[in-house]
Amino acid sequence: MNYDIATEYISYSQSAIKRYLVLILEQYFDQDIYDDLINAYINTRYYNLYPKVYDRFEENIVYYLKKSVQKFKDDAKFKEKAKYMFQMFKYVFAFDGVVECDSARELISEIKRVRLISLKLIDSSFEAKFYNMLEKDLIAKKEFLESFDDKNFTMNYLKVKDNIFYCVLDHNLKFSKLYSDYAINKVFNSKSISEQKLFVSYPLVAIKALQDIIKGNFTKVYIVDYVFSIAGKPKKNQRLLKYIDNDIIKEKVILKLSYDEYISNRDKVYELTRSGFKIALKIDKSFVFNEENIKLLRLFTFIVTDDSQIYDQAKDNYNILFIPNS
């Protein structure tokens, strides 16, 4: 299993929304109107692309949905359908996690009443069909989000400062008592298995970031280690980065690498940034604060150090984070 996790989830949600609207609206469904509505919805609900107009998440989405159908309201051919599609689209909020839904059955019954009153649509099996469809989709989404769980590993999210977390993978593996905890942890944190750990870490962090987005939280960011030895293995590197290769996830998942790794792999680092990945550069006492290096620091999303003296020296001028033992 290897794909862009967020895009997979969002694509499924988008296809589910279309199924709901086709079932609700029947002949009042219009593909052109739907295309504009769904683009506005996905861009606001999942990608946070538009300026914030209202504090409440759902009100912001409604604002951009209204804008998306405005052009249809002046066209006699589309006016009625645009009105009904916008009216029914707002029910999607409850089924896609934008707002809380106390009872799906009661909400579906309400949709049935609105269909009858506004659209004069009668279907005795509507409620059963809708509920079965919704139940199937909710189960599929839940199973997808849980499919990356691994009982052998735990991801610890260490708070660095408000809404910034450093991700540290820990294991729950059982070993013979012949081996000390020190020996086990030394092997677990060795370079020889560091690449393999990334294939556990990246999907877990991508799911965490996606769960924030589903809740309407676009402010939290997660810093993950990046092992540069994998950059020399193009297919393996591509498989790894695919987990987080989504525009909004790239805003929330930051790759950490050391200054020495940057110096040795400048071209590969620039290739990452050109692809939209954001970098946290770790510096230590070997870093020299000269004019050239000061300009360099401004190229990265974060500067990271586990040296308190460096942090005190740089904190007033740079976006630097103090992460012990990082």
Image (cartoon, rainbow, N blue to C red):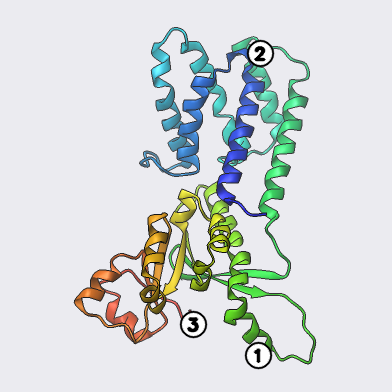
| Crowd rating for badge 3 (residues with CA inside 10 Å; few <14, some 14–19, many 20+) | few
Earlier in the chain: of badge 3 and badge 1, it is: 1
Residue occupying image coordinates x 39% and y 59%: 273
Q: Secondary structure at mark 1?
A: helix
Front position in the image: 270 or 47: 270
Identify whether 61 is placed above or below 145: above
Label 2 Cα neighbours within 10 Å, binned few <14 / some 14-19 / many ≥20 = few
Which residue position holds label 3? 325
Q: Which residue is mark 2?
A: 116
Residue 209 vs residue 16: left or right? left
Determine crowd level at label 1: few under 14, some 14-19, many 20+ residues with C-alpha closer than 10 A. Answer: few
Q: Horizontal and vertical percent for residue 84?
A: 54, 17
Callout 2 amino acid = Leu
Identify which residue is drawn at 68% across, 49% down.
144
Q: Could you say which disc has been placed on residue 230 in the image? A: none
* Secondary structure at numbered mark 2: helix
Q: Are marks 3 and 2 in contact (CB under 8 Å)?
A: no
From the viewer's side, name the closer residue of 280 and 154. Answer: 280
Could you say which quadrant of the image residue 64 lies in? top left
Residue 133 position (above or below residue 227): above
From the image, tell me which residue sits under label 1: 182
N-term mark: 3 or 2: 2
